Image (tube, helix red, strand yellow):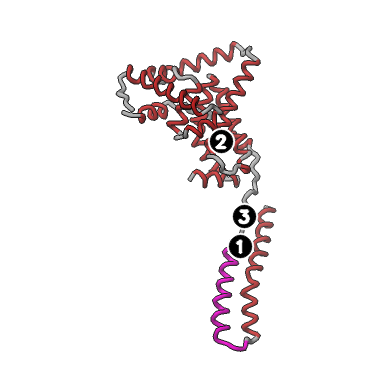
C-alpha cells in the first residue's frame, strides 16, 4: 500500500503526494515542536523536510521505508534549525510573547496530567518513543533516523517508557508490561 | 492496560498542524513535471500482445490446414503483424494533440 503510494508520488501524482503528507505531517510536526517549541518554526521545518524529500523522491530506491527517510530528514532539519537559533539567539520579544500566548492556549486545551507527562519527556525521548510506538519503527530504523547507537536507542526508549509508566501509575492508569 | 496505553496517549496527543493550506503550500513548491505521466490513447503493450496472439492463432489454424500459402493468407498475416504499428502512430498523434492543448 505504502509502496504503491510512493510509486504514484514518484510519477507526480498529487493525490499520492497529499496522502504521503497527510500520513506523516502530524507526527513530524509533533517531533519538530518538541525540539523547537515554536509552532511557526516547527511548521517551517516540517514543510521544508517534505519539500526536500518529495523533490528527491525520484531517486528514492526503496532501500529503506519512505517514512524512515522522511523522519531522518525531519530530525536533522530540527537539529539544524536549533543550531541556527543558537547562533542567533536574539529572538525578538514579540516572538517570545506570541509563543507564550500559544503555550497558554495549548495548556487550556490539553488534559493537564497528560501534558505534564509529555512535557517531562526530553525531545529525543519523545522522538524515540513516538517512532517506536506510533510508527512501529524497529530499533535499527530508529538508529538510521537519529544516528544514535543501538544501546543508546534502547536506553532512551527504556528511560522514556519508565517516565511514562511512573507518571501513569501516579495518575491512576493501571500500567503493566 | 499494557503498552497500548502509551501508544494511545501518544496518538491522542499528536500535535496537529493548524495551517489550512499546508499540503498545497508544499505541493506548490515542488518541481513536479506537469506532463510526468504521458497520456496515451491506446495501451501500446496490450495492443501488441492482442495482435500477436491473434496472429499466432491465425497462423496455427491457416498454416496447419493449407499446404500452399496463397497471397490472401499472406496479406492477412502481414496486416495482423503491422496493425499494432498503426495504433502506435495514432498514440503518438494523440499525445502530440493533447500536449498542444
- Answer with mark 1 or mark 3, whichever residue precedes in sequence: 3
Determine the residue positioned at 65% across, 80% down. Answer: B75
Callouts 1 and 3 in the same chain: yes
Give above or below for B77 relative to A28.
below
The answer, for residue B18, to whether it is visible in the render is no
Q: Nearer the viewer, residue B81 or B42?
A: B81
Q: Nearer the viewer, mark 1 or mark 3?
A: 1
Where's residue A157, x and y in %? 45, 25
Question: Element at badge 1?
Answer: helix
Quadrant of the rendered image containing residue A167: top left
Determine the residue positioned at 55% across, 12% down. Answer: A97
Per the rendered image, the range of residues in magenta is B42-68
Determine the residue positioned at 52% across, 39% down. Answer: A20
The answer, for residue A79, to whether it is visible in the render is yes
Q: Nearer the viewer, mark 3 or mark 2?
A: 2
Where's residue A6, x and y in %? 55, 44
Magenta highlight: main SS: helix
- Give me the C-alpha separation between circle 2 and circle 1: 36 Å
Give above or below for A52 relative to B94.
above
The chain that hosts pointer 2 is A
Q: Is residue B43 magenta?
A: yes
Mark 1, other Cα within 10 Å: few <14 / some 14–19 / many ≥20: some
- Badge 1 vs badge 3, beta-carbon distance below 8 Å: no
Quadrant of the rendered image containing residue A169: top left
> What label sits on residue A69 in the rendered view?
2
Quadrant of the rendered image containing residue A170: top left
Q: Is residue A89 magenta?
A: no
Mark 2, other Cα within 10 Å: few <14 / some 14–19 / many ≥20: some
The chain that hosts pointer 3 is B
> What label sits on residue B44 in the rendered view?
1
Q: Which residue is mark 3?
A: B39
- Give me the C-alpha separation between circle 1 and circle 3: 12 Å
Amino acid at each position: 500500500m505504502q509502496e504503491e503510494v510512493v510509486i504514484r508520488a514518484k510519477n507526480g501524482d498529487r493525490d499520492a503526494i497529499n496522502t504521503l503528507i497527510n500520513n506523516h505531517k502530524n507526527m513530524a510536526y509533533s517531533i519538530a515542536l518538541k525540539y523547537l517549541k515554536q509552532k511557526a518554526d516547527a511548521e517551517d521545518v516540517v514543510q521544508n523536510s517534505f519539500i526536500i524529500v518529495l523533490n528527491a523522491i525520484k531517486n528514492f530506491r526503496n532501500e529503506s521505508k519512505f517514512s524512515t527517510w522522511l523522519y531522518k530528514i525531519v530530525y536533522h532539519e530540527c537539529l539544524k534549525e536549533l543550531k541556527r537559533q543558537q547562533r542567533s539567539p536574539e529572538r525578538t520579544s514579540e516572538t517570545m510573547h506570541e509563543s507564550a500566548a500559544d503555550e497558554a492556549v495549548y495548556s487550556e486545551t490539553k488534559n493537564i496530567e497528560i501534558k505534564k507527562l509529555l512535557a517531562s519527556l526530553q525531545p529525543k525521548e519523545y522522538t524515540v518513543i513516538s517512532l517506536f510506538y506510533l510508527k512501529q519503527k524497529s530499533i535499527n530504523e530508529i538508529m538510521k533516523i537519529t544516528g544514535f547507537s543501538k544501546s543508546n536507542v534502547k536506553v532512551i526508549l527504556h528511560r522514556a517508557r519508565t517516565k511514562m509508566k511512573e507518571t501513569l501509575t501516579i495518575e491512576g492508569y493501571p500500567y503493566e508490561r | 492496560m499494557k503498552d497500548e496505553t502509551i501508544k494511545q496517549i501518544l496518538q491522542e496527543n499528536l500535535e496537529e498542524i493548524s495551517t489550512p493550506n499546508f499540503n498545497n503550500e508544499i505541493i506548490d513548491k515542488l518541481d513536479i513535471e506537469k506532463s510526468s505521466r504521458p497520456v496515451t490513447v491506446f495501451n501500446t503493450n496490450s495492443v501488441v500482445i492482442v495482435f500477436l496472439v491473434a496472429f499466432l492463432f491465425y497462423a496455427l489454424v491457416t498454416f496447419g490446414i493449407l499446404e500452399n500459402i496463397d497471397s490472401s493468407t499472406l496479406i492477412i498475416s502481414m496486416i495482423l503483424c503491422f496493425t499494432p504499428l498503426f495504433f502506435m502512430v495514432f498514440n503518438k498523434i494523440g499525445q502530440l494533440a493533447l500536449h498542444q492543448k
